[in-house]
Image (tube, rainbow, N blue to C red):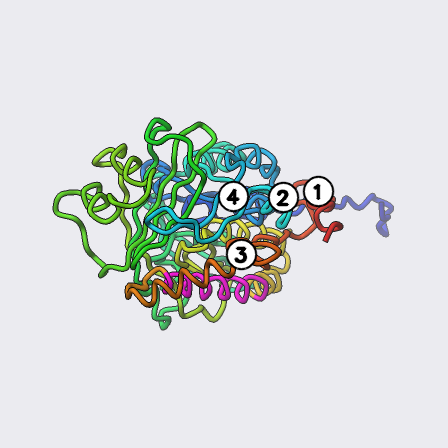
Amino acid sequence: MAITSDSQPELRPEPQPPSQPRAVVVGSGIGGLSAAVALHQRGWQVTVLERAVAVEAVGAGIGLAPNGHHALDVIGLGEEIRELAAWQGGGGMRSPSGRWLARTNSSAATERFGGPLVLVHRATLIDRIAARLPGGALRTGSPATLVDPGVAGGRAAVVTTPDGDIEADLVVGADGVHSAMRRALFPDHPGPAYAGITTWRMVVPATAAASFAPHETWGRGALWGSQPLLDGRIYAYAAAAVPAGGHSPDGEKAELLRRFGDWHSPVPEIVAAAGSDEVLRHDVHHLITPLPAFHRGRTALLGDAAHAMAPTMGQGGNQAIEDGIVLAHHLPDAGDIGTGLAAYSAERLPRTTGIVRKSARIAGLVSVRSAPGVALRDTLMRLAGSGPGPGLALRAFDGIADWLPPQRTYAAGAPDPQVRDRQEQR
């Protein structure tokens, strides 16, 4: 306490704690929720704005590769997700007649990448991530428009909603492949392009087929996948090289029966077991032209808004989760948001660009229709899968599925034991 000239004590204000930085996440998909939870665990006040009146898990199933659940380790969810792994034993790639083109097994994948491939229903994953948000953080029925991306070190970012404007230290655009946030930040970017394939997805009861080995089957301009879920149901997906914008006049189940009804078992049985209104069809669009950055001002993009990719490597959701974790890692507080966002872009842009391009190349292989081209592709698959060491299906994920997150735990500031152990093993 200081003493003034007339010997009266000088009262000084009590020091105030720093204000809690605020983040607004636009979109409640897997990437947006992961970012919101990670930021919350770093001490941010988070608000997630979702246009839909309810959070619905569109898309049936999702495959979480080891890199995805390694990222989820950081927010305390990885082990819980690994416990949902259903694939045990063999699997691989087949031809429509049923012949095996390349084989692998679950233990080889786990050993190579430090964890299993986990197939879960998208609703399960979304529910478990959202459960880690504080009460009231998720607002449904709240469409949001970016009014001002803000200036790092300067004015706040602003989004407008039906309930008024919201200012934030950080805005995260997680609003999907046709992102309005991306168009606002980068109006000169060409946007998503049709990847040349359309997909169908469904979840059917366990009674749809007898026991089977998980597989992808490659045909002429088409692909089918059958994967078990832990609860006994079957997640199935298909892709075909068809013009964009099409829909079957007699329903998508009938379309699948025409395309895949004479393929090996259990493909016809799975199609037959699907409800007529339970088959989801979507044209695949990707950002084959990368963005110049994943941020501008105080606004960042993640997931499909930043790097939409073909699903041929099953990495779309995994990369979105990685985005959310890495973004929070570089933004421990609002003090130096410009440096943090620049580091986020620098780390994520080259990695995701490479995966977008690799996924596009595989989509091109799916699109092969000619008999000589299919024969050559199948021969190469058999040769690549028959040599010593890991097969083609595993080697394709080197440098992708073995990714590990930054060591710092966002909740406590100390290394997470699981993440630290994996880092040390490498």
Q: Which residue is mark 4?
A: 46
Q: Which residue is mark 3?
A: 386
Compute the Cα span from label 3 to label 1.
39 Å
Mark closer to the observer (4, 2): 2
Please tell me how many numbered marks the rendered image carries. 4
Q: Which residue is mark 2?
A: 74
Q: Amino acid at mark 3?
A: Ser
Which secondary structure, mark 3?
A: helix
Mark closer to the observer (4, 1): 1
Q: Is residue 361 magenta?
A: yes
Query: Callout 4 environment at 10 Å: few (<14), some (14 to 19), or many (20+)?
Result: many
In the displayed structure, 5 sits above or below 57; it is below
Q: Which residues are magenta?
A: 346-365
In the rendered structure, are the residues bearing label 3 and label 1 in contact, judged by CB atoms less than 8 Å apart? no
Task: State the residue at coordinates (32%, 43%).
Answer: 264
Quarter-of-image position of residue 277: top left
Q: Amino acid at mark 4?
A: Val
Query: Callout 1 environment at 10 Å: few (<14), some (14 to 19), or many (20+)?
Result: some
In the displayed structure, 302 sits above or below 142; it is below
Which secondary structure, mark 4?
A: strand
Q: Amino acid at mark 1?
A: Asp
Mark closer to the observer (3, 1): 3
Q: Which residue is mark 1?
A: 416
- Tell which circle, 1 or 2, labels the residue nearer the N-terminal end: 2
- Tell which circle, 4 or 2, labels the residue nearer the N-terminal end: 4
